Image (spheres, coloured by chain):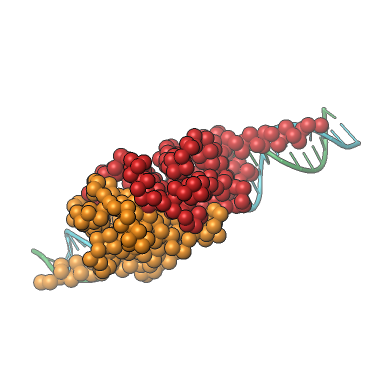
Chain colours: A red, B orange, C cyan, D green
Amino acid sequence: MGVIERREREREEVRRKILTAARDLFASEGYDRVTMRRIADAIEYSATTIYNHFEDKDDLVQALCQEDFDRLFHHLQQTPSPADPVEAVRQLGLAYARFGTSYPNQYRFMFMTPGKLEYLKEDDVSPGEQAFGLLRAAVTAAIEGGYFRPGDVDTMAQVLWASMHGAIALIINLQPQHWPHAPAAPDLVEQVIDATIRGFLAEPAAARRRGR
Amino acid sequence: MGVIERREREREEVRRKILTAARDLFASEGYDRVTMRRIADAIEYSATTIYNHFEDKDDLVQALCQEDFDRLFHHLQQTPSPADPVEAVRQLGLAYARFGTSYPNQYRFMFMTPGKLEYLKEDDVSPGEQAFGLLRAAVTAAIEGGYFRPGDVDTMAQVLWASMHGAIALIINLQPQHWPHAPAAPDLVEQVIDATIRGFLAEPAAARRRGR
DNA sequence: CTCCTGTATTAACAACGTTAAATATAGGAG
DNA sequence: CTCCTATATTTAACGTTGTTAATACAGGAG
């Protein structure tokens, strides 16, 4: 028969159109300027059509979030991982920051919209969980190699995440001229990850050997 | 005559009522649930009256922000400052975090609403600027005392700020059950500031002497 | 008394998210 | 071909939002 398959394919096609239109609007105009009607306009559909594919605006944003967490995960996974475990942690942090500063609007509604970032943990194989798993693994390697002081892996990964998140959040939310006293240091992200990593090193002398 | 003085006093009184009602609503219900009409209801005025005292909703939020930055500054200023410069930086960071986690809704629209935190720097004596000045001074003392490695003071203060901000932001935006792999460490804030401070120490051995 | 100035209210507007009803469209049954 | 049914889409509408224009009103000034 094949007719229902085609219908399903068409349905999926419209859903895709909605998602990409919404993503483009979010990315270019920011969260609040995106309305159901403007998304619909962009794909030349009526606004109510969206409700055939998503329960409500929250549901649409949730779907976008899931996709974006997936992108983040692949972005992190694709960054080359140096042999030195400490440098690997560093590169992972920098890759995460690059994602955040490159796609500020996506990052904003992934991590800065209260109640929205529950999609980090839908289950143990969700992209959010997997992304954190990369960091966790990198930290574990650094500990087991004797580079990082022994400590709770999850906590240490959280510390790294929190530090990077703070740097990203300030950078994408605060215009240069509005920073108190001085605009953001151009290498703020690097400074943050380096300071935190340095704080984790087992052998303080190692920090100097590594030249940071 | 005194009539214009009385009028001005009455005017200021209404303005105050609006501000406190708005603050209460923001604090108890969060940003999006606060509408002009609900603020007006709370003080038993018409919604349009607010527009006699504030240009628009943004202007009202701005006024609230200014007050809250003032509160933050005094909150930081009142925390006891230990003689040890490193410990002083630490206590300042912890005080900042206490402010953020104690008043999450205030912290949210102070630091997490894009385009809103320009009130950090209206001028060089604004509360936001002053608050950052406290951190800057503490860092300067730690450097000059030989505890922190020499480096750009502003950058180092920014690193500390960013790290703490990240921890606060994650804690107040992410419910415990939604954290990937494990809920937030109960001492995450302490772990973050300690790691960053440790990364700044001039004499790595000093970190061990201090027992962290 | 009249006039003027500033404040508060009522009524209204456009835009928002969302829902219900109306309508088109396409495929199967007779 | 005609009729029926199911799905997709649109039109119309509702309630709520921020905001503005028109209006009522109070009280000092002349």
Q: Where is residue B79 in the image (x, y as percent from the top left)?
A: 27, 68
Query: Is residue B88 visible in the rendered structure shown here?
Result: yes
Give the residue at x 47% y 36%: A82
Give the residue at x 36% y 65%: B98
Query: In the image, B115: left or right of A132?
Result: left
Q: Position of residue B181 (x, y in %)?
A: 56, 54
Q: Where is residue D23 in the image (x, y as percent from the top left)?
A: 32, 59
Query: In which quadrant of the rendered view does residue A28 lie?
Result: top left
Residue closest to the eye, A198 or B166: A198
Query: Is residue A31 visible in the rendered structure shown here?
Result: no
Figure quadrant of the N terminus of chain B = bottom left
Height in image: B31 above or below A208?
Answer: below
Q: Where is residue A189 in the image (x, y as percent from the top left)?
A: 36, 43
Residue closest to the eye, B113 or B7: B113
Figure quadrant of the C terminus of chain B = bottom left
Residue closest to the eye, B167 or B10: B167
Query: In the image, A147: left or right of B94?
Result: right
Give the residue at x 35% y 48%: A205
